[in-house]
Amino acid sequence: MKKMNLLSNILLISMSALSITAYAQNTELTGQIKGLSGATVKINYNNNGVFKVDSVTAVNDIFTWKANLNGPQLISLVIDNHSNSYFVGPGHTKLTGVKDASQSYKLTGSPMQDDAKVFSEFIKDLTDQEAMLSTAYGKASTQEKEALNKKREELKIQKKVRANKFIAAHPKSFFSIYLIAGRTGYGYAEVKPLYDMLAESAKQTEAGKKLSQTLETLKKSLIGNQMADFVQADTSGKQVKLSSFRGKYVLVDFWASWCGPCRAENPNVLKAYNAYKDKGFTVVGISLDDKAANWKKAIRDDKMPWTQLSDLKGWKNEISTSYGIQAIPSNLLIDPSGKIIAKDLRGEMLENKLRELFITNKKSK
């Protein structure tokens, strides 16, 4: 099942995923675009977690944009409602071209943009295939869509393999760090080998250090680790501790009212809860909502009787961030002692695991 996440497209991933905390460095972008005089240029960017929109006016076909960026950033340059994305900073970069031919714009002075271009060419055959699949999908029957979805997943795997090869071939590149940061939603086991490919010089950059910190966070959710106790408010405002469920198998379920895949999975969780609640199993929901009314309505609508907790901070929920949860639905299954024994169990996987714990294992004893 598709997850709701923050990492939908590698070239649109915010550099805030790295949360670079280095000192601000001056960045200057000069544009020399034929036919641009008098036009307003908008620059959208995310600097250290803060989304910003700047505007500059071109004079004699030239515009200049200056900003203090905490390391290289992906910016979106908007001219006459046409948008192109580029990596800039720190230092000076120059954009040249003709106004009505934005796809031919050329950016110089940005090593990260150069590497991004190399990577884009490296996976062009795959992105072309994805585009063709998207076109075919709109005209396909239900049966044909199933086959197309399978091909999409195959292409996604191939793109990951290509990205791995790029990282291995460019261990010093900041863009390699960027690619790895875009994979952190897939967990420690997938990201750690990629991080190990990086050169020491890349690891010692602020972005590299932040990626290392992210890995330590992801490591907390590894199977076999003890899940640290936490406390958060339930729907009535009462503070509830995870340790209050000690002695039971607990599914810590991360979800949100606005997450379609989560809502689609809730009936499966409800079925499992009803089947095993009297055998020593329960569920603790952790919502990434930021509006209490929406959260509570979803609980009622989906008929979820188990404990529901939230600090109503959305993606900044303190429990989810402490375990590096970047995509939902997601869950962790802990045993009666609080040890993580499984993760991301959904549908039949959840049913099979609970049957193993409560039926198969007991019969074998």
Image (cartoon, rainbow, N blue to C red):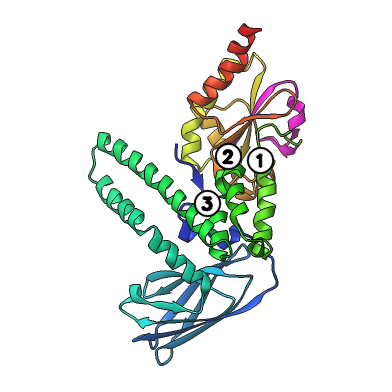
> Left or right of 149: which side holds 253?
right
CB-based contact (under 8 Å), mark 1 and mark 2: yes
Question: Pointer 2: residues within 10 angstroms few (<14), some, or many (20+)?
Answer: many
Q: Nearer the viewer, residue 74 or 44?
A: 74
Which residue does the numbered mark 3 point to in the structure image? 6
- Element type at marker 2? helix
> Left or right of 287: which side holds 5?
left
Query: Which numbered disc, 2 or 3, marks the residue that appears first in the sequence?
Result: 3
Viewer-nearest of discs 2 and 3 = 3
Whether residue 8 can be seen here: yes
Provide residue 324's location: percent of width, then percent of height: 64, 46
User: What's under tag 2, amino acid-wise?
Assistant: Trp
Query: Which residue is pictured at 27% across the width and 35% down the height?
Result: 142
Relative to 200, residue 52 above or below: below
Query: Which numbered disc, 1 or 2, marks the residue that appears first in the sequence?
Result: 2
Q: Which residues are magenta?
A: 230-254
User: What's under tag 1, amino acid-wise?
Assistant: Ser
Relative to 365, residue 321 above or below: below
Which residue does the numbered mark 2 point to in the structure image? 295
Query: Which residue is pictured at 64% across the width and 49% down the height?
Result: 313
Provide residue 153's location: percent of width, then percent of height: 39, 42
User: Is 249 inside the magenta-drawn segment?
Assistant: yes
> What is the quadrant of residue 278 in the picture?
top right
- The quarter of the picture where the C terminus appears is top right
Which residue does the numbered mark 1 point to in the structure image? 310
Question: Pointer 1: residues within 10 angstroms few (<14), some, or many (20+)?
Answer: many
